[in-house]
Image: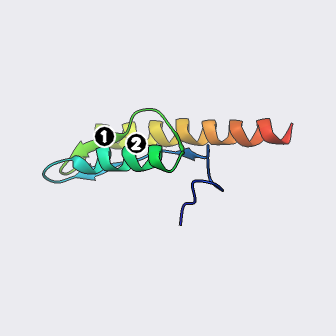
Amino acid sequence: MINPIRDKGKLAGCFGSYGWTGETKDILIANFTTLKLNYFGEALFIKFKPQEKDFENYIHYGKAFGNTFIGKINSKVS
C-alpha cells in the first residue's frame, strides 16, 4: 500500500497497453498526484496489441526510468 506520508516524492511511472477508453492513464496520474509521488515523464500506453516498435519504446522508457531511479539513489548515498 502506498502511503503519501512515507512515500512522498518517490519515483512513479506507468506504461502498458489498453483496450477501449484509455482512461486508466489519467486515473493513475491523478492517483500519483494525490499520493504525492514524483511522476516520471509521460505515460507510455499503446492501444490494443503492441507492435514491435512499441516494445522498443517500452524498453527505452524502462531504461530511462531505471537511470532516473538509480540517479536518485546515488544522490541520497553521496
> Is residue 17 among the parts visible in the rendering?
yes
- Which residue is label 2 attached to? 58
In the picture of the structure, the residue carrying the numbered disc 1 is: 54
| C-alpha separation, residue under disc 1 versus residue under disc 2 | 6 Å
Label 1 Cα neighbours within 10 Å, binned few <14 / some 14-19 / many ≥20 = some
Which corner quadrant of the image does residue 46 belong to?
A: top left
The 10 Å Cα crowd at callout 2, few under 14, some 14 to 19, many 20 or more, is some
Q: Position of residue 14 (x, y in %)?
A: 41, 47
Report helix, strand or loop for mark 2. helix
Marks 2 and 1: in contact by CB < 8 Å? Answer: yes
Instruction: In the displayed orientation, state which residue is furthest to the right.
Output: 78
Q: Which mark is residue 72?
A: none
The residue at 12%/52% (across/down) is 20
Residue 51 appears in view: no
Which residue is at the front of the view, 31 or 61?
31
**Residue type, label 1:** Asp
Q: Amino acid at mark 2?
A: Tyr
Farthest residue, direction bottom: 1
Percent coordinates x, y for residue 4 in the rendering: 57, 54
